[in-house]
């Protein structure tokens, strides 16, 4: 029981820490949310390419893989593994690794669009 609670705590602290950094950047800089998203994605790719992000994933699990930096980690990990099969594998490895997550996002987004009616915000 305590192992499960410790796992949740580590995931919450790491994932929450990543999101807190992003929120601080949004609140106190003039960097747009889109640029912050790209920077975090690239940070995940960079940290995995030098072998650091894997330690964070091993420590925090979903706390490190769910934020957008985790998507960068997934792309880099797939490209690294695909590179074992040559240059073409390096290009397609990231796409293969991320295909299930991207497909799920598209399918569930489409289902939500069918179920719920979009409304514009009133000022």
Image (cartoon, grey):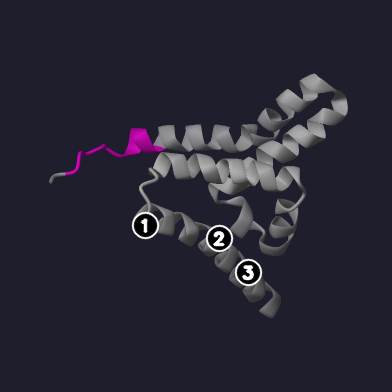
The CA span between labels 1 and 2 is 20 Å
Q: Which stretch is magenta?
A: 112-121
Q: Can residue 38 be seen in this view?
A: yes
> Residue 99 vs residue 90: left or right?
left
Label 2: how many Cα within 10 Å (few below 14, some 14–19, many 20+): many
Please tell me the numbered disc located at residue 10: 3
Q: Is residue 115 found inside the magenta-colored segment of the image?
A: yes
Residue in view at x 66 percent, y 69 percent: 7
Q: Residue 115 falls in which quadrant of the image?
A: top left
Frontmost residue, 62 versus 54: 54
Label 3: how many Cα within 10 Å (few below 14, some 14–19, many 20+): some
Q: What element carries label 3?
A: helix
Q: What element carries label 1?
A: helix
Q: In the rendered structure, which disc, 3 or 1, sits on the residue that comes first in sequence?
A: 3
**In the image, residue 60 above or below residue 48:** below
- Give the labeled residue for mark 1: 28
User: Horizontal and vertical percent for residue 59?
Assistant: 71, 63
Frontmost residue, 107 versus 97: 97
The CA span between labels 2 and 3 is 8 Å
User: Horizontal and vertical percent for residue 28?
Assistant: 36, 57
Q: Is residue 1 visible?
A: no
Q: In the rendered structure, which disc, 1 or 2, sits on the residue that comes first in sequence?
A: 2
Judged by its main secondary structure, the magenta piece is loop
Instruction: Look at the numbered discs 3 and 1 and tell me whether their residues touch, using CB distance below 8 Å.
Output: no
- Give the labeled residue for mark 2: 15
Q: Is residue 19 found inside the magenta-colored segment of the image?
A: no
Q: What element carries label 2?
A: helix
């Amino acid at each position: 029981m305590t192992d499960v609670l410790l796992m949740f705590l580590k995931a919450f602290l790491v994932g929450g820490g990543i999101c807190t950094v992003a929120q601080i950047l949004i609140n106190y800089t003039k960097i747009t949310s889109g640029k912050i998203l790209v920077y975090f994605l690239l940070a995940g790719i960079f940290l995995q390419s030098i072998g650091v992000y894997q330690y964070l994933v091993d420590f925090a699990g979903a706390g490190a893989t769910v934020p957008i930096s985790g998507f960068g980690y997934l792309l880099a990990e797939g490209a690294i593994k695909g590179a074992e099969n040559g240059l073409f594998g390096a290009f397609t490895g990231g796409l293969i690794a991320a295909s299930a997550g991207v497909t799920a996002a598209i399918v569930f987004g489409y289902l939500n669009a069918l179920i719920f009616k979009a409304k514009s915000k009133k000022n």
